[in-house]
Structures are given as C-alpha cells and as structure tokens.
C-alpha cells in the first residue's frame, strides 16, 4: 500500500501535487500536512508501528508557486483527447499525432492543429486536408483552459478517484 499515490492540497485546498504515499506519511509525521482522507486498507509498517495510508493530505502552510504553463507535447495531446482517435473514435494506447492541416501545407504545431489519431486514420488522411478525404473531426481541437499544478495525465486519472474528485476542479475542455 505504500505505492499508492496521494493527492496533496495546498492550505487553501487547491490541488498542488501528487506524491507517493511514503512521502505523504513523512509530511504528516513531520507536522507539515494533515490527513483529510485515507485509503481503506491495512496501514504501512514504519519504525514506529503501523501508519495509515493517506489518500488526500492538506499542507498546513500555504505554498506559493508560479502558475505553471501547460506545455504542448505528445503526451498532453494524448491526454487532452483521452487516447481517442479524433476521426473514428477508437480508444487505444497505440496512437499517433496528426496535423489537421498538414505541415507541408503550412500547418503549425499548435493545440488547434494537432489531434490524437489512430494509425489507420492517419494513413487514410495522409497529408491531405479533411475535405479531400471526407473525414471529419469528432471535436474541434483547442488549447485546454486548465493550467494544472498537477500534470494533465494525473488530473485525468485523479478524476476517476472518488475521493480525489471532490478536490479537483472540473474542466469541460478536457476529455474525461
């Protein structure tokens, strides 16, 4: 159970980070954080006996951080589109990135021009425009408004955790 992930909240309950349970137990033991929720499993063995395994902790002091920038990477495009081909709707981990307007036609590498795409659709579309192939996008690609302290992939997996969901903001422009 020490391998569990723990949601770390700032003192104002804003999601700040995801850390291993071992680190969260240390934060609680040192008096830097309070446990808000714990996993319903047997505790972790420590030198001082059995410790609970926190699911969510809140820092006692406010941590000031600069607002992070959501970087445009393959991983964030896959996360934004939830590993779903934006042409046929298939969900798989074996995806590629497609330029809606191909690079050879001046298509930029931007949030609005890159989509998650299965290999079959990528081959079918090739370096053509959508109207030339008869293909359509399931949804218009755009830059997510969410600027996370936690990574977009951790945010999306955290939305599936019943306890964490109460603390994570809802953003409709990210596939859930």
Image: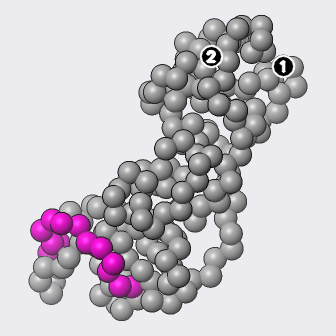
Q: Which residue is mark 2?
A: 122
Q: Indicate whether 101 appears above or below 57.
A: above
Assign a secondary structure to mark 1.
helix
How packed is label 1: few (under 14 Cα within 10 Å), some, or many (20 or more)?
A: few
Q: Position of residue 76 (x, y in %)?
A: 60, 44
Q: Which residue is mark 1?
A: 104
Q: Position of residue 135 (x, y in %)?
A: 67, 13
Residue at figure coordinates x 12%, y 68% from the top left: 42
Q: Position of residue 44 (x, y in %)?
A: 17, 72
Q: Residue 39 in magenta?
A: yes
Number of marks drawn: 2
Residue at figure coordinates x 18%, y 66% from the top left: 40
* Region in magenta: 33-45
Q: CA distance from mark 2 to mark 1?
A: 15 Å
Residue at figure coordinates x 45%, y 83% from the top left: 59
- Looking at this view, is 169 or 10 the one in front? 169
Q: Indicate whether 172 appears above or below 7.
A: above
Q: Indicate whether 106 appears above or below 34.
A: above
Assign a secondary structure to mark 2.
helix
Residue at figure coordinates x 74%, y 24% from the top left: 100
Q: Indicate whether 136 appears above or below 159.
A: above
Q: Position of residue 132 (x, y in %)?
A: 77, 7
In this orientation, does residue 107 appear?
yes
Majority secondary structure in the magenta region = strand
Horizontal relation, residue 78 to residue 107: left or right: left
Horizontal relation, residue 38 to residue 115: left or right: left
């Amino acid at each position: 159970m020490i391998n569990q992930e723990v949601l770390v909240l700032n003192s104002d309950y804003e999601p700040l980070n995801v850390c291993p349970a071992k680190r969260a137990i240390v934060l609680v033991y040192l008096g830097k954080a309070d446990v808000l929720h714990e996993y319903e499993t047997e505790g972790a063995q420590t030198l001082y006996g059995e410790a609970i395994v926190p699911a969510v902790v809140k820092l006692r002091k406010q941590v000031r951080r600069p607002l992070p920038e959501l970087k445009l990477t393959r991983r964030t495009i896959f996360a934004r589109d939830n590993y779903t081909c934006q042409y046929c709707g298939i969900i798989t981990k074996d995806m590629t990135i497609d330029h809606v307007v191909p690079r050879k036609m001046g298509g930029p590498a931007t949030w609005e021009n890159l989509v998650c795409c299965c290999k079959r659709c990528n081959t079918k579309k090739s370096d053509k425009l959508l109207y030339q192939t008869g293909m359509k996008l399931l949804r218009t690609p755009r830059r997510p408004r969410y600027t996370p302290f936690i990574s977009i992939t951790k945010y999306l997996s955290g939305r599936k955790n019943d306890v964490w969901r109460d603390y994570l903001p809802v953003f409709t422009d990210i596939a859930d």
